[in-house]
Image: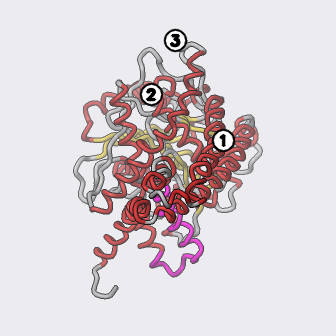
Amino acid sequence: MKGISDKAKYRLLEIFPGATVWVTLLGAVALSFFQPLAAIVFIIVFDLIWFFRVAVFLAHLFSAWRKYRSTGRTDWMTRLASEPNSDRLFHLVFLPTFHEDIGVIRTTLRSLAATAYPKERMLVVLAGEERDAKRFLRNADIARREFGNAFGQFLITLHPADLPDEIPGKGSNLHWSGHRARELVDRLGIPYGDVIVSTFDIDTVVHPQYFAYLSAQFLSSPRPTRTSFQPIALYNNNIWESPAPVRIAAFGTTFWIMTELSKSDHLITFSSHSMSFRALVDVGFWQKDIVTEDSRIFLQCLTHYHGDYTVTPLYLPVSMDAVSSGTYVRSLVGLYRQMRRWAWGVEHFPYLVWNLGRDPQTPLGVKFKYIWNAWEGMFSWATAPVIIFLMGRLPLWVAGGTMREVALVENAPFTLEWIMNASMIGVMVSAALSLLLLPKPPARFTPARRVIMLAQWMLLPVTFIIFGAVPAIDAQTRLLLGRYMGFNVTEKVRSRRAGEPSLAEAVGV
């Protein structure tokens, strides 16, 4: 590719994911009209592959579920007390916030103060935005009065607006507050290797044993500064008040994370997570010009350490708010935008190819694994629901009379129906486990509400397409066309009648 600028080469990498999605979808349609027999074979093979993937998904989900249950029954503070050098660890917690109400901030700080870990070794950073300075400073003043003495240090930062080489969002806020936190750690004289960083969304309710469990895992890790730590993400804070499609998407995300924890060699960080401050300083903190900083920070470490960086699964949950925007329609719009923002993680593919591909020190197997996972995960997200639920019948509808007499064509509907019915086992298992993860309902909800929570899974095919494939196609098409996304904050309105969630209930204790 001599003569092509680096910028043009990188653009080609950005084009690749979206191009493969559209070639596949349009190719499947074209094949259905011009070669229906080949299209039928393709769809049957594709569905069979996904049937086996559902089976593997369930195996990993059950494995993660067992570990989740056993981990939650362990007294990690007692176990941590027997670990040598446990008293040297400090926890640095970042809470970036923008446009949130004081009630949300208060609930999160209260959950941190209620954890079973010495509070004098917890450093909490409440990170606000100058673009929302009036609201944030008012909330920060209340938070300081109520929680200023609850932790070893309570640092408040205000990220200036319109700094160069930034896009407004969580990543740039964290980049700024990270440097301010480094000044605090240096002032306190704490070694970077003794500081564990946790980055939480502002609505995060942590499990009471989270920091004790995290500390124990950190100390038992052979190289704790070369690994991140990923907990289970629940969206239980307001799950009873959320629309059915939002609940399905929330539980789907939780189950996806649980299966990824079980196959930890594929795991990257997502949403709330933890890592060593040493590694965070080494990579220069979070990137300030991207949307999906939660996963990118792991990839920054992976490339910086030449592939010698991993993620350690944590089988305790942290709970956040599901999308809720006051009305049903606005909540669904908010859900779509949230899914599109998550799907913008496709921006990691060109980053990985560009950085790992040029690094001779990273093992070839590591390069292939992460680059393949970055592409295949986004490709499947965009194409699988459409091919499975929409395109399965298309070649049968357009096949000519003579073609309908072919045995494969004649039996295709029964084959596809069998595969779909067998795959419904995954839906039934997900429905059952979702009931076990639900917190106690607010008093105004009758027991019949649980029946609705079970019946909502009938919407899964529609939800997978509208709030799965479509936003993924949207995000990848935007990258293909160079229409880069900015960071949009997901609106999460809590019902006043619901009040603040019980900390124990929200995280499934």
Q: Secondary structure at mark 1?
A: helix
Q: Earlier in the sequence, mark 3 or mark 1?
A: 1
> Is 363 contained in the magenta span?
yes
Range of magenta residues: 357-381
The residue under label 1 is 425
Q: Main secondary structure of the magenta part?
A: helix
Residue type, mark 3 in image: Arg
Residue visible at 48% across and 21% down in the picture: 500
Side of 360 where 131 appears, left or right: left
Quadrant containing the N terminus in the rendered view: bottom left
Point out the frontmost of discs 1 and 2: 1
Rendering coords of residue 275 (x, y %): 55, 53
Residue type, mark 2 in image: Pro
Could you tell me how far apart the alpha carbons at marks 2 and 3 are, in whole angstroms? 16 Å
Residue 243 — which label? 2
Q: Secondary structure at mark 3?
A: loop
Front in this rendered view, residue 400 or 154: 400
Rendering coords of residue 293 (x, y %): 42, 53
The residue under label 3 is 444
Query: Relative to 53, is 206 above or below?
Result: above
Residue type, mark 1 in image: Ile
Residue 253 — which label? none
